[in-house]
């Protein structure tokens, strides 16, 4: 069904990550006209694996006619092993305890969403919103490069450090909750000859994970390190590599090799492990979507699933309200508030367990791993809890 919007018709989305293109997909389907502005020169297809869990995530993919496509992109990665400095395998985490119902590379998902929406959606790459002035006639937007334009609505789907959020709600310090870690992700050749498996090596305050990917033809590297908030230029890859180099200097196991490969990795993604906490995600003609409004952090395992469900809800509410954003925004918030809260709670208390920051914490983690060998039902609990949380929403029946 195509809805003729009474109020909103043209909608500017800032950010072509996961949430932005997913929203563009639904808006087009409902007869709105989306434009997506992305700061990067093209789709950013970096990142590790992301999970879809439970019936709400799967129904969202199905309604987008993406379930088969995404299933075809499964990582197929098996168990994860904790190793010691000599590479000896110490403790196994079975695949079913780490992935969701469907696990895909974030980059593959971003690319599929872009491909699905590029026809009929205007994409402006290499640009960013500079200002937004909202009045009865619309949201008047200036860009860093393009000419000024007026849209009916502006949606900030521009991630943790959202420009739309900063312009509409104020500086990020008021909303970003740092969870004490940073995470660097990049792609390398499969130097450890991993066969559909991953290895985890931990030291005090840092953790390296290497996973085979794309049928063992390459590997994804994820480096976590404990740190207070850092200041660096997010557009300067060399500066970001230096941050990671410093954090892992003197590291054991394969870390020197990984740092060597980092120097030439094309797709480094570095960010703090943070959540976004806000009392409201909408103001006037502006709404926030995905990480920009309620980033749950990689520790929750929910970022992409949540962003896609939320994109469906936001577009569905706009369609139901015939484009009246005042009604739609209110329903968007009330439908998702408790669900978002649940997703964010999944990350509570995880950081020191994942990357121990004291010898006592490290000993506790080792003890816990030993115990879990004999109590497999306890080891399954985090995955079960994540699935329950991901399923805790009655997805409204929006127009199809
Ligand atoms: C390259 C990359 C790799 C990632 N890897 C992982 C991962 O391995 N595991 C994980 O759990 N999460 C990862 N994330 C975060 C994850 O994608 C999100 O938590 C989740 O998918 C929600 O998506 P989002 O679209 O809200 O945010 P994001 O996926 O972060 O997308 C935001 C988009 O907005 C763009 N943007 C930022 N500022 C501006 C601006 N001023 N103007 C226009 N565009 C802007 C960014 O370039 C990006 O494309 C990654 C994010 C990125 C960008």
Image (tube, helix red, strand yellow):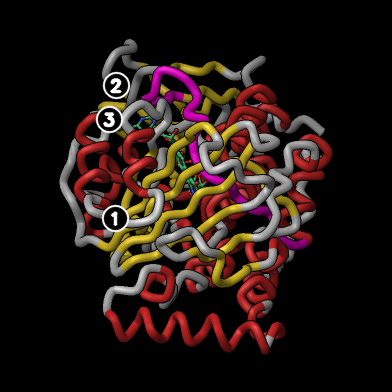
Question: Where 362 sits versus 171, above or below?
Answer: below
SS under mark 1: loop
Residue 375 seen from this side: yes
99 vs 232, left or right, is: right
Read off the residue under disc 2: 142
Structural distance between the alpha carbons of marks 3 and 1: 21 Å
Q: Report x, y in % for residue 207.
A: 39, 60
Q: Front-most of 315 and 183?
A: 183
Question: Where 39 sits versus 206, above or below?
Answer: above
Read off the residue under disc 1: 251
Residue 177 seen from this side: no
Q: Mark 1 Cα within 10 Å, few/some/many (few <14, many 20+)?
A: some
* Residue occupying image coordinates x 32% and y 27%: 129
110 vs 320, left or right, is: left
The question of residue 231 being in magenta is answered with: no
Q: Report x, y in % for residue 371.
A: 58, 88
From this viewpoint, which residue is outermost toward the left?
Answer: 231
Read off the residue under disc 3: 237
Q: Which residues are magenta?
A: 37-54
Q: Is the residue indicated by label 3 positioned so its CB lies within 8 Å of ligand 1?
A: no
SS under mark 3: helix
Q: Report x, y in % for residue 380.
A: 68, 77
Q: Front-most of 63 and 367?
A: 367
Name the quarter where the C terminus is drawn.
top right
SS under mark 2: strand
217 vs 200, left or right, is: right
């Amino acid at each position: 069904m195509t809805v003729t919007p009474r109020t909103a018709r043209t909608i500017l989305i800032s950010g072509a990550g996961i949430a932005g293109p997913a929203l563009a997909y639904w808006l087009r389907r409902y007869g709105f006209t989306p434009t997506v502005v992305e700061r990067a020169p093209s789709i950013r297809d970096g990142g590790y694996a992301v999970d879809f869990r439970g019936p709400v995530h799967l129904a969202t993919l199905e309604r987008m006619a993406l379930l088969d496509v995404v299933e075809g992109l499964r990582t197929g990665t098996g168990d994860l092993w904790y190793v010691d400095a000599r590479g000896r395998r110490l403790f196994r985490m079975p695949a079913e305890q780490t992935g969701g119902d469907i696990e895909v590379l974030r980059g593959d998902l971003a690319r599929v969403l872009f491909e699905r929406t590029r026809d009929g959606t205007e994409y402006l790459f290499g640009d960013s919103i500079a200002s937004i002035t909202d009045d009865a006639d619309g949201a008047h937007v200036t860009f860093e490069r393009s000419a000024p334009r007026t849209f009916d609505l502006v949606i900030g789907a521009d991630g943790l450090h959202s420009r739309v959020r900063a312009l509409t709600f104020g500086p990020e310090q008021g909303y970003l909750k740092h969870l004490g870690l940073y995470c660097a992700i990049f792609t390398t050749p499969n130097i450890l000859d991993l066969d559909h498996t991953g290895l985890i090596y931990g030291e005090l305050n840092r953790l390296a994970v290497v996973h085979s990917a794309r049928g063992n033809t390459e590997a994804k590297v994820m480096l976590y390190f404990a740190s207070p908030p850092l200041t660096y230029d997010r557009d300067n890859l060399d500066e970001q590599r230096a941050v990671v180099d410093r954090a892992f200097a003197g590291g054991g196991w394969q870390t020197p090799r990984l740092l060597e490969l980092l120097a030439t990795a094309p797709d480094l993604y570095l960010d703090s492990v943070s959540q976004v906490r806000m009392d409201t995600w909408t103001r006037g003609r502006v709404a926030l979507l995905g990480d920009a409004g309620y980033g749950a952090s990689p520790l929750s395992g929910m970022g992409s699933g949540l962003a896609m469900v939320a994109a469906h809800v936001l577009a569905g509410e706009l369609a139901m309200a015939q484009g009246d954003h005042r009604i739609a925004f209110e329903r968007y918030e009330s439908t998702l508030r408790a669900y978002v809260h649940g997703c964010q709670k999944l990350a509570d208390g995880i950081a020191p367990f994942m990357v121990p920051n004291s010898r006592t914490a490290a000993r506790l983690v080792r003890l816990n791993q030993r115990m879990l060998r004999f109590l497999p039902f306890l080891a399954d609990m985090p995955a079960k809890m994540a699935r329950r949380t991901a399923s805790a929403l009655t997805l409204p029946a929006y127009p199809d």
